[in-house]
DNA sequence: TATTGTTATACTCTATAACTATA
DNA sequence: TATAGTTATAGAGTATAACAATA
């Protein structure tokens, strides 16, 4: 008796706002949950900033990495992003299909590709980066004095959490041929 | 000429560690990217803590919510977690299939379910919550004095970011029948 | 024998659209 | 007409396994 989903269904999905009347128990006190809420909010926010380009946060990161490390291999890209080889492949497929990047022969190794942005990709990325950076500055501004401290604490948190699970000797020295 | 994937392929996938020699460009300065790194690390870390129970962070959150709000509807659960109805359905399906929770008739509305933990679910959750809480405390301890400030800043960040995209009148007053 | 990239496949997460039964 | 839940389906995202070409 209904045509399709109703008007009141305009519920902003993905928005993880605290719902009044709901008891969140220990979630409210957890660092991990606070992080998830914040990340969720930022994710949605990113899409607003990058709406014009139709690029996800992950793809944006890939673009920046390729731009700053021209000729990098697919495998290295995956490594830098915590992806499996096959994931890096799909990511690269998308970037090339959309005209952002291209695969060229890698000098010295006939098996590998060197990744590069296309001319159009470089042009577009310049604007996209500006938009994202402006966006990030707005967030920092909204945080006031807490901003810089937050950034530092996040970096440290990533380090502490990985240290607990992997316990490498040093933060930097990793990812090398065994 | 290889049987399957080789020994050196034990690359901890999903681990988003900074790779030495790679230039991350503006990513290193972005709040959003720092957040993603931290969240990624915490996610993997959570799995260590909850390995014994085979529960994802999201499912853990659902369990806590149901435990603290017995009889809550599927729809409300989805709302609290930023999920679509169909997502809440699948989540609930999993929780019931695993014996964590059960659907009972909701008093007053024959269309709706009331969600409840099972007796076994309550018992298991008590231990799981203890493990997760201990884990979170360890993270906070690792952060030292930065810890509490980080938590506060994250809460504020989530608020700032959603404010920029939705601009509601007040943080709390939302999500009500129009 | 190990590595780079590929193909094929599968599983998770989450959305949309359309449907049912209530309200 | 709107809502709660459901079904079916599709799309990301990411993993595993097996393979080819190259190292």
Image: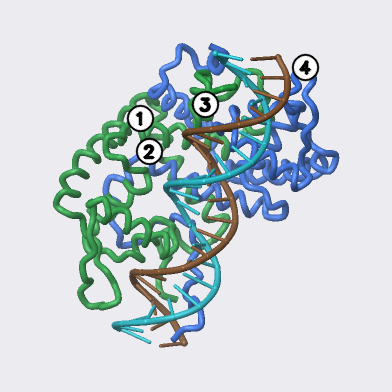
Chain colours: A green, B blue, C brown, D cyan
Local secondary structure at mark 3: loop
Q: Secondary structure at mark 4?
A: loop
Residue B85, relative to residue B124: is it above or below? Answer: above
**A104 sits to left or right of B102:** left
Foreground residue, A1 or B12? Answer: A1
Q: Nearer the viewer, residue B129 or A14?
A: A14
- Real-space Cα separation, disc 4 to disc 1, in angstroms: 47 Å
Q: Earlier in the sequence, mark 4 or mark 2?
A: 2
Q: Nearer the viewer, mark 3 or mark 4?
A: 3
Residue on which the image places disc 4: B108
Determine which of the numbered discs, if any, sits on residue A140 in the image. Answer: 1
**Rendered location of residue A26, percent (x, y):** 67, 33
* A105 relative to B132, above or below: below
- Contact check, label 4 and label 2, Cβ < 8 Å: no
Question: Residue A95, percent across and down?
Answer: 29, 53
Identify the element where label 1 is drawn: helix
């Amino acid at each position: 008796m209904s045509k399709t989903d109703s008007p009141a269904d305009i519920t902003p999905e993905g928005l993880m706002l605290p719902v009044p009347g709901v008891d969140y128990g220990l979630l409210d006190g957890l660092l991990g949950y606070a992080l998830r809420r914040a990340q969720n909010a930022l994710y949605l926010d990113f899409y607003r900033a990058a709406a014009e380009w139709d690029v996800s946060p992950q793809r944006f990161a890939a673009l920046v990495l390729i731009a700053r490390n021209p000729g990098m291999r697919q495998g290295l890209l995956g490594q830098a992003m915590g992806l499996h080889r096959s994931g890096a492949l799909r990511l690269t497929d998308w970037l090339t299909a959309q005209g952002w990047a291209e695969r060229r022969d890698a000098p010295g190794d006939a098996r590998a590709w060197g990744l590069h942005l296309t001319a159009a990709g470089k042009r577009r990325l310049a604007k996209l980066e500006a938009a994202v950076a402006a966006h990030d500055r707005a967030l920092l501004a909204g945080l006031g004095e807490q901003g810089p401290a937050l950034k530092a604490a996040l970096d440290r948190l990533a380090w502490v959490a990985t240290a607990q699970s992997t316990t490498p000797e040093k933060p930097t020295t990793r990812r090398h041929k065994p």
